[in-house]
Amino acid sequence: EVQLLESGGGLVQPGGSLRLSCAASGFTFSNYAMSWVRQAPGKGLEWVSAISGGGSPYYGGSVKGRFTISRDNSKNTLYLHMNSLRAEDTAVYYCAKEGEWEPNYFDYWGQGTLVTVSS
Amino acid sequence: DIQMTQSPSTLSASVGDRVTITCRASQSAETWLAWYQQKPGKAPKLLIYKASTLESGVPSRFSGSGSGTEFTLTISSLQPDDFATYYCQQYNSYSRTFGQGTKVEVK
């Protein structure tokens, strides 16, 4: 059974940093691209960033230059390093597994972790 | 980036109704289009991928069609469990993008 478990969310001040983690299990992690998708309170879904199985990163325009995606295939873990955080980054952040090639649809999702950027 | 526009934003319907949601792309997404269902406080759930392929376990009352820049999600006979928000997502480009969502509410 595929499981994705996010952690690392919380309250951070504007301009601050935070690192999210997503622990994956139930599939061969290194074979699949992974993404972060966020959802601001009461708003729609926004793709944030993706990383190929081999480590090539891709970013949405609103986070490029501030966020860094990475993965540790030996630990089956996905990361999102978030710097220079703004109020508009406040959202639930979901980790999502992609299909067999990239780019792709998201076939499994975690439960999400809430990031709140506020002073 | 390919922009995705869904219509309508909100749809009021009754159990048993046939429901259609449209998703338009700013440029061709070919058939690289997925649909998701999301309920409040929950993660999205994949319904359809490659425009018309039903994900395993998804009821057959859901169907998808389209290619290029226009796509539709149809629920043939709306059930109580189907009241939710639906999103389209293109994956023809490395900047994956979602539509803004369509909320299906009780009429």
Image (spheres, coloured by chain):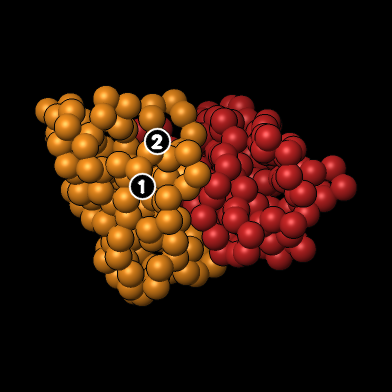
**Structural crowding at the residue carrying mark 1, measured as other residues with C-alpha within 10 Å and reported as few (<14), some (14–19) or many (≥20):** many
- Left or right: A94 with respect to B54? right
Q: Chain of mark 1?
A: B
The residue lying furthest to the front in this view is B60
Circle 2: element type: strand
- Left or right: A51 with respect to B78? right
Residue B11 quadrant:
top left
Q: Quadrant of the N terminus of chain B?
A: bottom left
Q: Amino acid at mark 1?
A: Tyr
Q: Chain of mark 2?
A: B
Residue position marked by numbered label 2 in the rendering: B38
Residue position marked by numbered label 1 in the rendering: B87
Q: Point out residue A41 in the picture as x, y percentages from the top left corner.
A: 40, 32
Q: Residue at x 33, y 73 (%)?
A: B68
Q: Which chain is orange?
A: B
Q: Residue at x 26, y 37 (%)?
A: B103
Task: State whether residue B26 appears in this view.
Answer: no
Q: Which chain is red?
A: A
Q: Point out residue B43 in the picture as x, y percentages from the top left corner.
A: 49, 34
**Structural crowding at the residue carrying mark 2, measured as other residues with C-alpha within 10 Å and reported as few (<14), some (14–19) or many (≥20):** some
Residue B86 quadrant:
top left
* Relative height, residue B85 to residue B52 (above, below): above
Task: State whether residue A52 appears in this view.
Answer: yes
- Left or right: A94 with respect to B45? right
Q: Amino acid at mark 2?
A: Gln
